[in-house]
């Protein structure tokens, strides 16, 4: 779409200011099953997001269709949207930040790698998994996925921003059978540099994820000192930080109302909003065009800031935090590329003095078993017992329950090994004094 | 969206290298959402989804691609790119395409787009006001009207052309109640494969009162106890237990590869003899219904389990090949951005003989999970979890105090054998189901039923 045509029409129809974001994505996915290519798919898509202010109200429109009528369609939808709105949100189209910390995260090596080489990796992964252990009865999937995205933002103040990046991931899952018992294991390895991918390490992690669960049974119900692994820590932290979403605070549905400058976690917890970190989640402007910057969110347990978009920042009378996020046209708030500052001791050292405890390695049902407003949770969980300072037998089909605020206030230590999770959070294992586990 | 001539060219290009089946799926979907947040109308949002997906099958291999550009040039480019995956000679030729006519079962008297925005907003405001005025502890209210008009066309190498228009509407009410130290929510979201007539038939005020009332009552509820106990699961959305625990593992995507506990068990007893379960995509105007699935196959009433015996699976065309079975009309997808796979439509446990009171009355000490929230399952192991949105303790056959924060966990194959008493009050409820082919509307359903023992997780200690 010619953006000039859209801006022209917008002006003609009395839109005070407006913005267009054109987002393009291409991707390739392939999946191997029993030595054959089972699925192969390619995608090429684009979506146009348009916003504009009419009579002080913001209106939105989204279209995947791009033809000669698109500019007019978008303007009409914006007028209809703004015309029906009674929102008391402050409507802002952004003039631009003074400085943007742009970095090129597009890696040519990904596109240069041949499709044959990618497929060969998948065949190799499948073979190696089948050979890893006789109890691996099937490799449910060995797949490769590659994606390239580009986003362009233009607005009526003349702001022009562009970002392009790419990444890939390998995914594999195994089915483990031992007598009547069936378990599954999987792993996703996400990178933007092909040199970082190590097949043998990946295969070992997939297989061991499944094999380690064999013999898993519910444990005795009780309150156990618990080491929570990096993956589950990331999930729980993401749910907890959603309370720092300024929109939820301002709409009175957050645990963090009036909590700025107050203790919301143990003094061992320091959390950074770090969008400029050089990883695949790096991004230098938010969906309203505000320059991204790194900042502490929780410092030694004390809440330092909420996450804002332009509207919530203006309402609160603070500087924007560059967390504006386009949710199907409407601007919400996104919290990503969060880093939990690691501690000094390893996980092994942290559990050395625990006589009887629990190592939580997986939770299920986050979308239903956790109330993000109150922080109360009751979730399906699995993991391992800790006995006499060592990781012991596997535990399966138990529930853990508690409250996120209590849990984070209860953190005794953060381990020193951190890892970037698929959710974009970089986390370490955490040790909590007591967690309620319900089993037998 | 494209004509037959274009379709013929693209299908033959897709088949040029030996594929045995090719399909073009075209979609134009207009989604409109109206949202009233604590009494104020938010800017309405509208999105236009538009594109085409091309699929080529060759025995047990499938290739898929999609694009927003529906020009002949773009579609041919995609077809050529996909067919490059195979290296044979063309064996299937498409010479003509005929339009397939089918009965339209889901009547729309008043289309959603024919009703002015103001009228719709007024209904949302009515619900919103009832919730806000219900109690001073209600701090936020949300009323949302989700409208969806999905226009699809399918051309395939069987020489068939299908066209369907699917109109769906959902009316969502949510209330958040707060008092110092406690936040609780109430929710309802009735929906249908229908037009505005469905919304006009709702008793919005009664729905709104119920939502607000539950949020407020939960503020003073005690934490749910934990442990293994008998549980009575309420009708309607309670059916999510069957959806998660048994519906997903009955999908051909898991069964065809032997990755399901139900694989190879047709004709065998997999559930208590009181259990009959059905997936019915033909129910007029139901949320999960369609005239045809996203592969053009007519939807069916598919009896999955009868009197405890496994009868059938949910099968799409591709996974059906591995199983040597015909599609059951279960091939569904969120949009052209997804390749179809086997999915549920309206899945429910059939009504039994008992009354609701008899079922509750049979439990000495246990839990009554009247309303369930969402859940999830690992389809290979069958391990599942789901949360109770509204739950009470049962003592001596009587419904006693409300408790909060209950999660039920278990294993699908095992739980089916423990559903041992079923009432006669079958109801269905609406939800969105997420899986490999995206998020799609599905109904869950069941009568009130008893599970003899299930693990309940909560913060309230042992049940006394």
Image: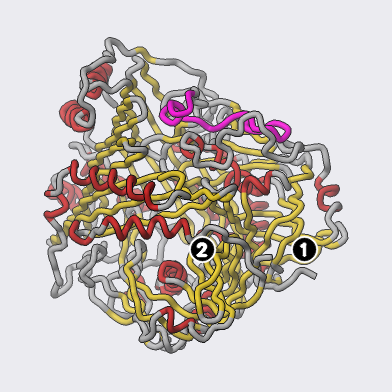
Horizontally, is A426 left or right of A440 in the view?
Answer: left
Which residue appears at 61% of the width and 58% of the height? B387
Horizontally, is B140 left or right of B114 in the view?
Answer: right
Q: Answer whether residue B260 is visible to the viewer in this image.
A: yes
- Give the quarter of the figure containing the C terminus of chain B: bottom right
Residue B322 located within the stretch drawn in magenta: yes
**Residue located beneath label 2 in the image:** A363
- Give the quarter of the figure containing the N terminus of chain B: top left
Vertically, is B415 above or below A281?
A: above
Q: Along the line of sight, which residue is nearer the eye, A35 or A193? A: A35
Q: State the colouring used for the structure image.
A: secondary structure
Which numbered marker is on residue B216? none
Which numbered marker is on residue B393? 1
Which residue appears at 45% of the width and 15% of the height? B101
Q: Along the line of sight, which residue is nearer the eye, A174 or B220? A: A174
Chain label for disc 1: B
Q: How many marks?
A: 2
Which numbered disc, 1 or 2, marks the residue closer to the eye?
Answer: 2
Horizontally, is B383 left or right of A339 in the view?
Answer: right
Horizontally, is A319 left or right of A107 in the view?
Answer: right
Could you tell me residue B259's position as x and y percent? 49, 41
Label 1 CA crowd tier, 10 Å (few <14, some 14–19, many 20+): many
Residue A415 located within the stretch drawn in magenta: no
């Amino acid at each position: 779409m010619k953006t000039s045509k859209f801006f022209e029409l917008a002006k003609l129809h009395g839109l005070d200011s407006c913005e267009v974001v054109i987002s393009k994505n291409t991707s390739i996915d392939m999946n191997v099953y029993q030595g054959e290519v089972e699925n192969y798919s390619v995608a090429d898509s684009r979506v146009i997001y348009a916003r504009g202010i009419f009579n002080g109200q913001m209106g939105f429109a989204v279209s995947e269709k791009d033809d000669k009528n698109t500019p007019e369609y978008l303007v009409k939808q914006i007028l209809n949207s703004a015309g029906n709105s009674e929102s008391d949100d402050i409507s802002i189209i952004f003039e631009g930040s003074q400085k943007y910390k742009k970095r090129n995260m597009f890696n040519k090596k990904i596109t240069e790698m041949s499709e044959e080489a990618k497929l060969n990796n998948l065949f190799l992964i499948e073979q190696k998994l089948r050979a890893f252990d006789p109890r691996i009865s099937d490799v449910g999937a060995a797949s490769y996925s590659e994606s390239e995205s580009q986003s362009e933002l233009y607005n009526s103040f003349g702001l022009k921003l562009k970002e392009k990046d790419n990444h890939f991931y390998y995914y594999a899952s195994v089915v483990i059978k031992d007598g009547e018992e069936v378990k599954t294991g999987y792993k996703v390895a996400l990178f933007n540099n092909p040199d970082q991918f190590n097949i043998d390490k990946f295969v070992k992690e997939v297989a061991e994820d499944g094999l380690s669960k064999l013999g898993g049974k519910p444990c005795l119900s009780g309150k156990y000192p618990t080491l929570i692994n990096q993956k589950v820590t990331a999930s729980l932290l993401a749910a907890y930080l959603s309370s720092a979403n300024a929109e939820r605070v301002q709409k009175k549905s957050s645990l963090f109302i009036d909590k700025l400058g107050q203790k919301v976690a143990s003094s061992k917890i320091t959390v950074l909003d770090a969008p400029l970190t050089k990883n695949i989640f790096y991004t230098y402007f938010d969906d309203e065009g505000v320059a991204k910057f790194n900042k502490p969110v929780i410092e030694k347990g004390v809440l330092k800031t909420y996450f804002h978009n332009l509207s919530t920042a203006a309402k609160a009378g603070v500087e924007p935090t560059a967390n504006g996020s386009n949710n199907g046209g409407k601007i919400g708030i996104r919290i990503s590329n969060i880093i939990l500052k690691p501690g000094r001791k390893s996980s092994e050292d942290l559990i050395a003095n625990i006589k009887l405890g629990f190592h939580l390695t997986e939770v299920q049902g986050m979308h239903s078993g956790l109330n993000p407003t109150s922080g109360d949770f009751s979730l399906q969980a699995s993991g391992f017992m800790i006995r006499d300072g060592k990781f012991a037998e596997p535990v399966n089909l138990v529930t853990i329950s508690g409250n996120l605020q209590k849990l984070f206030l209860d953190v005794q230590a953060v381990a020193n090994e951190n890892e970037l999770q698929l959710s974009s959070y970089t986390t370490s294992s955490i040790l909590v004094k007591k967690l309620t586990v319900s089993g037998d | 969206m494209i004509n037959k001539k274009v379709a013929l060219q693209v299908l033959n290009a897709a088949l040029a290298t030996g594929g045995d089946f090719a399909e073009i799926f075209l979609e134009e979907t207009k989604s409109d959402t109206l949202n009233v947040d604590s009494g104020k109308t938010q800017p309405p949002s509208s999105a236009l989804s538009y594109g085409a997906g091309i699929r080529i099958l060759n025995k047990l291999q499938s290739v898929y691609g999609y694009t927003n550009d529906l020009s002949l040039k773009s579609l041919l480019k995609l077809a050529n790119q996909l067919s490059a995956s195979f290296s044979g000679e063309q064996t299937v030729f498409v010479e003509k395409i005929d339009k397939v006519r089918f009965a339209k079962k889901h009547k729309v008297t008043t289309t959603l787009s024919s009703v002015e925005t103001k009228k719709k907003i007024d209904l949302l405001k009515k619900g919103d006001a009832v919730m806000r005025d219900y109690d001073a502890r209600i701090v936020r209210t949300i009323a949302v009207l989700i409208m969806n008009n999905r226009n699809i066309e399918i051309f395939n190498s069987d020489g068939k052309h299908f066209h369907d228009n699917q109109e769906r509407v959902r009316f969502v009410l949510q209330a958040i109640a707060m008092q110092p130290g406690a936040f609780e929510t109430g929710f309802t979201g009735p929906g249908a494969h229908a037009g505005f007539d469905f919304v006009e038939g709702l008793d919005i005020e009664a729905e709104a009162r119920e939502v607000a009332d539950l949020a407020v009552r939960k503020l003073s509820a005690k934490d749910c106890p934990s442990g293994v106990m008998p549980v009575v699961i309420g009708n309607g959305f309670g059916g999510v237990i069957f959806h998660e625990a048994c519906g997903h593992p009955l999908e051909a995507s898991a069964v065809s590869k032997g990755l399901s506990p139900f694989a190879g068990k047709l004709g065998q007893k997999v559930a208590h003899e009181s259990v009959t379960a059905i997936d019915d995509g033909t129910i007029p105007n139901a949320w999960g219904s369609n005239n045809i699935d996203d592969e053009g196959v007519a939807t069916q009433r598919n009896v999955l389990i009868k009197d405890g015996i496994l009868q059938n699976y949910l099968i799409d065309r591709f996974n059906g090949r591995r199983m040597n079975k015909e599609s059951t009309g279960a091939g569904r997808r969120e949009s052209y951005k997804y390749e179809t796979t086997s999915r549920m439509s309206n899945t429910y446990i059939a009504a039994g003989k008992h009354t609701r009171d008899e079922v509750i009355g049979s439990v000495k000490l246990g839990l009554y999970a009247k309303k369930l929230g969402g859940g999830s399952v690992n389809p290979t192991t069958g391990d599942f979890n789901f949360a109770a949105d509204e739950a009470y303790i049962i003592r001596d056959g009587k419904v006693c105090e409300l408790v909060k924060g209950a999660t039920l966990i278990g294993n699908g194959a095992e739980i089916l054998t423990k559903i041992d008493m079923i009432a006669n009050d079958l109801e269905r409820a609406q939800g969105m189901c997420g899986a490999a082919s995206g998020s799609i509307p599905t109904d869950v359903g069941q009568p009130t039923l008893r599970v003899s023992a299930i693990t309940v997780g909560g913060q309230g200690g042992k049940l006394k």
